[in-house]
Image (tube, grey):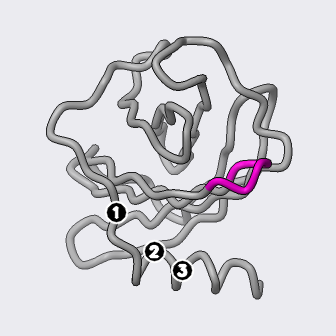
Amino acid sequence: MKYALLLIAAILFATPVSAEDYEKGPNGGLMLDVAGIDAELLTSGNTVTINAFEAFKAKPVSTKGYVGAVLIAGGSARETVTLAPQGENSLKGDAKNPIPAGATITLTIKTAEGKSGQAKFKK
């Protein structure tokens, strides 16, 4: 719980990276460079998945030891979802409600090597 509060504070006080043009990820999601990796955002219903790849390559990066969270903002609703490593190169978490079209999803991530950063996706 204490770590989740630190992630929320980081989201609120840090300036997120944003991009007008996203790369298309290997799985068809939106992809941005953050914390030295390419992070691909995928959503389905209320599930958020971040796939990690080497920067500028489609080679998967292990998410063992990674910590992450997303802030989902759609209309007047906001929700923070903690992400946990899942599979070889993914972080996954479930929101309480389905993620609406047009939502802004701000990712805060820390790699196993200690690099951290933020990226803002517009769904």
Assess disc 3: are there few (<14), some (14-19) or many (≥20) residues with their C-alpha within 10 Å of its C-alpha.
some
Local SS, label 2: helix
Local SS, label 1: loop
Q: Nearer the viewer, residue 89 or 95?
A: 89
Q: Which residues are magenta?
A: 111-115
Q: Is residue 59 left or right of residue 48?
A: right
Rendered-image quadrant of the N terminus: bottom right
* Residue beneath disc 3: 8
The amino acid type found where label 2 is placed reads: Ile
**Please, is residue 68 above or below residue 33 in the view?**
below
Of label 1 and label 2, which has the lower sequence position? 2
What separation in Å lies between label 1 and label 2 (alpha carbons)?
A: 8 Å
Q: Badges 1 and 2: C-beta atoms under 8 Å apart?
A: yes
What residue appears at the point 66 percent right and 56 percent down from the top-left corner? Answer: 110
Of label 3 and label 1, which has the lower sequence position? 3
* Residue beneath disc 2: 11
Q: Position of residue 97 (x, y in %)?
A: 47, 62
Q: Position of residue 77 (x, y in %)?
A: 32, 76
What residue appears at the point 40 percent right and 17 percent down from the top-left corner? Answer: 28
* Residue beneath disc 1: 16
Q: Position of residue 90 (x, y in %)?
A: 69, 34
What separation in Å lies between label 3 and label 1 (alpha carbons)?
A: 13 Å
Nearer the camera: disc 3 or disc 1: 1
**Please, is residue 41 above or below residue 116 in the view?**
above
What separation in Å lies between label 2 and label 3 (alpha carbons)?
A: 5 Å
The amino acid type found where label 3 is placed reads: Ile
